[in-house]
Image (cartoon, helix red, strand yellow):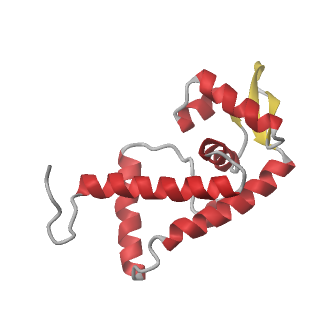
């Protein structure tokens, strides 16, 4: 196993460790709002618009049975509702309820603040460079839009 030289870490370790950090911040924020991390992700995705179950499964990377359980639990908690799909009478679309929309607005704003704080010691130019480089990774790997910039919601 290689050792860090004077605090420098490589790209792989930096990406993996930063993923753990962001996931921990996200999970802690979700917990404080009475959500699981997956419920928080579901609600954030639904901020933009209602989605069909297949679309949600693909965006969240969940198998059909896992997604069904997640939507069922979220529906029982009054956060989402299933609506008939206007294009396909056999399908449903999942949408936020008014309670879910209010909760996700608060959760989203707080989570964004906490993630933003991770780079509070950076100069604005460094933040822009980091965003551009990570944005390229996201674009190059066709990562679904599961979380958007705070000023680009709704």
For this orientation, the residue located farthest to the top is 90
Can residue 51 be seen by looking at this rendering?
yes
Classify residue 127 as left or right of residue 113.
left
Q: Which of 63 and 36 is in front in this view?
A: 36
Can residue 85 be seen by looking at this rendering?
no
Residue appearing at x 56%, y 55% in the figure: 26
Q: Nearer the viewer, residue 53 or 40?
A: 40
Please state, as top left, top right, bottom left or bottom right, where the C terminus lies in the image: bottom right
Residue 81: percent from the left, percent from the top?
81, 36
Position of residue 43 relative to residue 6, above or below, is: above
Classify residue 5 as left or right of residue 75.
left
Q: Quadrant of residue 135?
A: bottom left
Residue appearing at x 71%, y 45% in the figure: 49
Residue appearing at x 74%, y 34% in the figure: 73
Residue appearing at x 62%, y 21% in the figure: 65
Q: Nearer the viewer, residue 137 or 77?
A: 77
Q: Nearer the viewer, residue 3 or 80?
A: 3
Residue 90: percent from the left, percent from the top?
76, 17
Residue 105: percent from the left, percent from the top?
73, 59
């Amino acid at each position: 196993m290689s050792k860090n030289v004077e605090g420098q870490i490589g790209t792989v370790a930096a990406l993996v460790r930063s993923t753990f950090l962001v996931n921990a911040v996200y999970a802690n924020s979700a917990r404080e709002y009475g959500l699981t991390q997956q419920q928080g992700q579901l609600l954030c995705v639904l901020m933009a618009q209602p989605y069909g179950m297949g679309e949600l499964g693909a965006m969240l990377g969940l198998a059909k049975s896992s997604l069904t359980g997640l939507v069922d639990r979220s529906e029982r908690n009054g956060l989402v509702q299933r609506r008939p799909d206007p294009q396909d009478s056999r399908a449903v679309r999942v949408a936020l309820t008014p309670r879910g929309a209010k909760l996700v607005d608060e959760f989203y704003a707080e989570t964004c603040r906490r993630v933003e704080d991770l780079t509070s010691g950076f100069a604005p130019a460094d933040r822009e460079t980091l965003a551009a480089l990570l944005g390229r990774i996201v674009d190059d790997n066709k990562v679904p839009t599961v979380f958007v910039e705070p000023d680009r919601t709704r």
